[in-house]
Amino acid sequence: MSKEKQMLFPFAAIVGQEQMKTALLLNVVDPGIGGVLIKGEKGTAKSTTVRSLAQVLPEVEHVKGCIYHCDPKSGKGYCPNCAEALASGVKLEVERSPMRVVELPLSATEDRIAGTLDIEHVLQTGKKKFEPGVLAQANGNLLYVDEVNLLEDHMVDLLLDAAAMGVNYVEREGISFEHPSKFILVGSMNPEEGEIRPQLLDRFGLCVEIHGEKDHSTRAEIVSRRLAFDADPKGFTEAYAEETKKLKDSILEARKILSRTSADKELISMASHVALYFEMEGHRADITMVRAAKANAALNGRETAGREDIAVVAPMVMIHRMKRKPFEETKFDIGELRVCLQDI
């Protein structure tokens, strides 16, 4: 384990906030879920939890030496360098490395995020020169944006478009460049500091709303573990090494299970029934619910997803997509969900 990872609070040691941890793990099992938005008051371990996820992220294959970490198994969507090498008959070498949590600075400009084209170099040499940005680093990894609600809307649009398409496309003065940019987008925010437009909210696959723990013994355990970690980060992390390995292994196994399963008609029917019951617009909620339910089943070692999985993921899929009136807080009624699932 690297020094950097040792200095992170262990993901396996985080107390409570089960829904937040589940939402993150589901996205690691199936990045196609579409990321997660974490909403909560300050001091609720949002950033700590996301950053600590690096300790359990699996290894992935990528083209050796490629700055964009192209996926050698994709068969398409290579960066210009890898595509040119393949076209000339060069065999791409492959290596493995752990997924990373790439953080986007709040002060980042559009050029810092997307990368820049050197127009002068193109005019002088006739060849494209591209300076990669954060979206290049994020390919194959998890991209974390803290205080995502404070980013300008067009910046959030840029991130969501790249996450949805898996490609970063940059055009300047009629000259364009593109490279693969498939990543898990995780945003966190404190609602007291401002909200995100509903159109952008819908683009996040899952959303969780978290609060400080109210149980006395749970709060005491949180404080105890934090102080123990601060006193001896290395020793505390090593104490959770076995739990961390088990969690990492369960993610790898879940990915294997997911790769050999498909959504059956019954699961699709259940998701559509729930989406209609809660008056979801469009079909994004249905699709996300099916994917998340399958990932939840796989994470629990099951090949078939069912009612219990829908019950777990439905709140995370729908809380940010529910219609609300101005100045009205969105609340998801678990009791209504139980009634809905009983009718299926």
Image: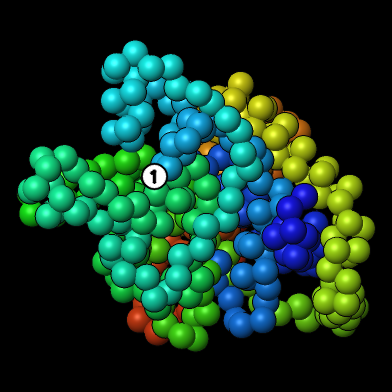
Q: Residue at x 21, y 53 (%)?
A: 117
Q: Residue at x 61, y 33 (%)?
A: 96
Closer to us: 62 or 213: 62
Identify residue type, mark 1.
Ser
Q: Residue at x 66, y 46 (%)?
A: 57
- Residue farthest along the front direction in this orientation: 124
- The quarter of the image holding the C terminus is top right
Closer to us: 238 or 342: 238
> In the figure, residue 334 lies in which quadrant?
bottom right
Closer to us: 93 or 302: 93
- Residue farthest along the top direction in this orientation: 89
Residue 130, position as x, y percentages in the image:
26, 49
Residue identifier under label 1: 181
Determine crowd level at label 1: few under 14, some 14-19, many 20+ residues with C-alpha closer than 10 A: many
Q: Residue at x 40, y 63 (%)?
A: 201
Residue 7, position as x, y percentages in the image:
75, 65
Above or below, 35 against 49 in this view is: above
Q: Tell whether 187 sits left or right of 49.
A: left
Residue 291, position as x, y percentages in the image:
53, 39
Above or below, 44 against 75 in this view is: below
On the question of residue 161 being in view, the answer is no
> In the figure, residue 325 lies in which quadrant?
bottom left
